[in-house]
Amino acid sequence: MRDEGICGRKKRRFKCTTDSNHEYPVPPNVLERNFTSERPDEVWVGDITYVATREGWLYLAVLIDLCTHQVVGWSMSQNIDRILALDAFDMAVAHRKPPPGLIHHTDRGSQYACPDYQLALKINGFQPSMSRKGNCWDNAVAESFFGAIKEELIYRVVFDTRDAARYAIFNYIEVFYNRRRLHSSIGYMSPIEFELANFQATAA
């Protein structure tokens, strides 16, 4: 490997983003690993991950539609708190305007279980759902998205600043992932292409 100029990929630092050690009520797991949905805005899944920069950590919260696999809401901050999660939620609601009854599934982190977030769900008429404790497979679609963005972007770049990371992540989500990246689960189409092809006519 030395002769060929090849080096192994180093194991990435692990940073826990789920604070389930809280006293907030935890909704039941309504989703129960049913990662299919027939129409957009019936089920959203959300999660938070971290991005290393030379300035320190940057945290990314997303909400993903299970039908189209589109990232419908996202936010970034140097703080991992309820505001980070609520900003992604507010973006998704403002952009999509989903009807009441939507299932909203996340892990049981304090950012999602806190009263402010649960009140936002109640006001919009959404049904909360949370993973079982310590079970990442209950939120596999969100974990899969984070796996993709880390392998295709984050692990390939050393970000000098949080702003540089924000710009790159914005472009990955809005320019590449939602509009150009092909998904085998939706017929090798991009999320937006899939929604336009399958639901534009019926929504008119």
Image (tube, grey):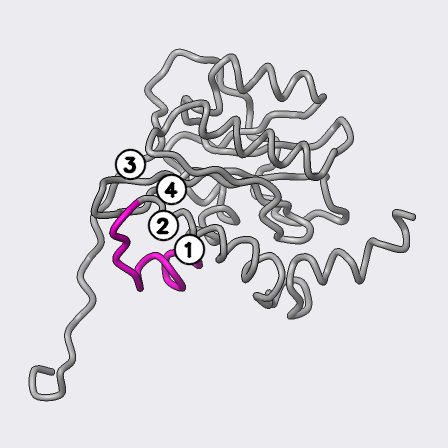
Write the start and end of the magenta stretch as one range. 147-161
Q: Position of residue 96 (x, y in %)?
A: 71, 39
The numbered mark at residue 165 is 2
Task: Kindly indicate the quadrant of the structure image that contains residue 82.
Answer: top left
| Label 2 element class | helix
Q: Which corner quadrant of the image does residue 90 belong to?
A: top right
The amino acid type found where label 1 is placed reads Ala
Q: Nearer the viewer, residue 18 or 35?
A: 18
Write the residue at 62% across / 53% down.
69
Front position in the image: 25 or 49: 49
Residue 3 image offset from top left, x and y in percent: 7, 88
Residue name at image x 13 percent, y 87 percent: 4
Q: Which mark is residue 16?
A: 3
Badge 4 element:
strand
Mark 4 = which residue?
49
Mark 4 or 3, closer to the camera: 4
- Residue 106: x and y, percent? 51, 33
Q: Which of the marked residues, 1 or 3, is nearer the chain's N terminus? A: 3
Look at discs 2 and 4 and give the one toward the viewer: 2
Q: Which residue is mark 1?
A: 168
